[in-house]
Image (cartoon, rainbow, N blue to C red):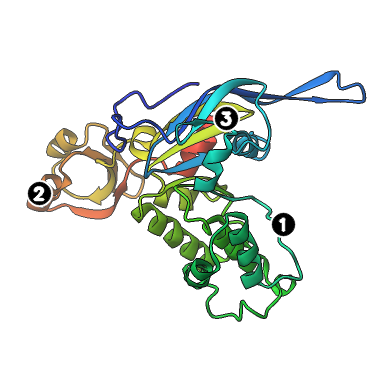
């Protein structure tokens, strides 16, 4: 794995063992009529996710994200390598009671109501009926379905966004310590995406660990402590947003006026623009720069943080 995150990450507590740990995890599928062709879906993936962390896994379609999820959940077996979930080997049945999972395209029973489906999920975890009657309304409220009649409305009459929400409630029915979310924003409108982000942040406040993947990079940038990028089965980078994108202490400035010699001291790479203004980057305490510019009689036209967005960083790394 090529890591751009060599600096220490203060967001993690290195004293605690990781909640998710993979070491050289690999998955190869055999295809063809005689099963004599090999397709490498995941290559030697090693990563760690820590308690209370919101970890985002990014990658284009076919990168191996869902394969990694299925390996961690014990749905499929690795070709090589090993992994731990909550301190137990992947596939250990005792751990599954403490895990929640929302698949990318959850299959829900059309002729059950949302309430009946959550009762079914609760029964799988052997949750007592008395606790179900408390927890199901709480979850419906959490995912924004409290206003519908979940006891009567069958799920075949739900919109795609509503199905995604009830799937999220199902993933939380057992009050898990670790939650896997495969494309949780899929099918949601902007309001639904905002609510889903709020749900994930609420779970984080409760101390839960969230491991999810998404194609909506703006959402990932807002809620994740760390992210990793997977491309063609290979983990190409992993780190906090500050480690990957750079710290937010450099600003791109466009302005007019001022003393050119003094401006060059503040903006070593300053350059003139065709409209008579100038532009450059200022690093550090920009308040002192603004005060100096004001004394020079200059003016700011535009000023913004100078670091790539997660989307720009993502595209750049895929093109390498």
Question: Secondary structure beneath disc 2?
Answer: helix
- Contact (CB < 8 A) between labels 3 and 2? no
Q: Residue 84: horizontal and vertical position, in percent? A: 50, 30
Q: Earlier in the sequence, mark 3 or mark 1?
A: 1
Q: Earlier in the sequence, mark 3 or mark 2?
A: 2
Query: Which residue does the image show at 55% across and 43% down from the upper left?
Result: 96
Query: Which residue does the image show at 27% across and 46% down from the upper left?
Result: 253
Front residue of 19/32: it is 19
Can I make out residue 228 in this image?
yes
Query: Which residue does the image show at 31% across and 35% down from the upper left?
Result: 12
Front residue of 294/65: it is 65
Disc 3 versus disc 2: nearer the observer = 3
Instruction: Find residue 268 and report its image quarter.
Output: top left
Q: Which mark is residue 107?
A: 1
Q: Which residue of the protein is positioned furthest toward the right in this rendering?
A: 33
Q: Disc 3 marks which residue?
A: 319
| Cα gap from disc 3 to disc 2, whole angstroms | 44 Å
Question: Secondary structure beneath disc 3?
Answer: loop
Q: Residue 9: horizontal and vertical position, in percent? A: 30, 32
Can I make out residue 58 in this image?
no
Instruction: Find residue 309 and report its image quarter.
Output: top left
């Amino acid at each position: 794995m090529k890591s751009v995150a060599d600096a220490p990450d203060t967001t993690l507590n290195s004293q605690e063992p990781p909640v998710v740990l993979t070491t050289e995890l690999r998955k190869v599928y055999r295809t063809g009529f005689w099963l004599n062709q090999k397709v490498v879906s995941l290559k030697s993936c090693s990563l760690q996710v820590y308690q209370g962390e919101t970890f985002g896994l990014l990658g284009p379609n076919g990168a191996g994200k869902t394969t990694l999820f299925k390996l961690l959940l014990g749905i499929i077996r690795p070709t090589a390598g090993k992994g731990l979930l909550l301190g137990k080997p992947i596939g250990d049945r005792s751990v599954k009671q403490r895990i929640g999972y929302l698949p990318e395209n959850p299959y829900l029973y059309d002729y059950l109501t949302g309430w009946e489906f959550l009762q079914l999920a609760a029964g799988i975890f052997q949750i007592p009926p008395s606790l179900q009657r408390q927890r199901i309304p709480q979850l419906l409220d959490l995912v924004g379905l409290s206003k519908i009649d979940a006891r009567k409305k069958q799920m075949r009459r739900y919109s795609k966004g509503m199905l995604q929400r009830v799937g999220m409630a199902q993933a939380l029915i057992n009050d898990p310590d670790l939650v896997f979310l495969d494309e949780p924003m899929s099918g949601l409108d902007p309001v639904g995406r905002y609510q889903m982000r709020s749900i994930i942040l609420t779970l984080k406040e409760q101390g839960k660990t969230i491991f999810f993947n998404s194609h909506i990079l703006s959402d990932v940038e807002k809620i994740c402590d760390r992210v990793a990028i997977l491309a063609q089965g290979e983990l190409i980078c992993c780190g906090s947003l500050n480690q990957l994108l750079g710290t937010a202490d450099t600003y791109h400035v466009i302005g007019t006026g001022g003393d050119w010699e003094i401006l060059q001291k503040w903006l070593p790479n300053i350059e003139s623009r065709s409209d008579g203004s100038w532009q450059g980057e200022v690093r550090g305490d920009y308040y002192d720069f603004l005060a100096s510019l004001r004394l020079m009689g200059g003016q700011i036209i535009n000023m913004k943080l100078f670091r790539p967005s997660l989307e720009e960083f993502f595209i750049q790394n895929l093109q390498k």
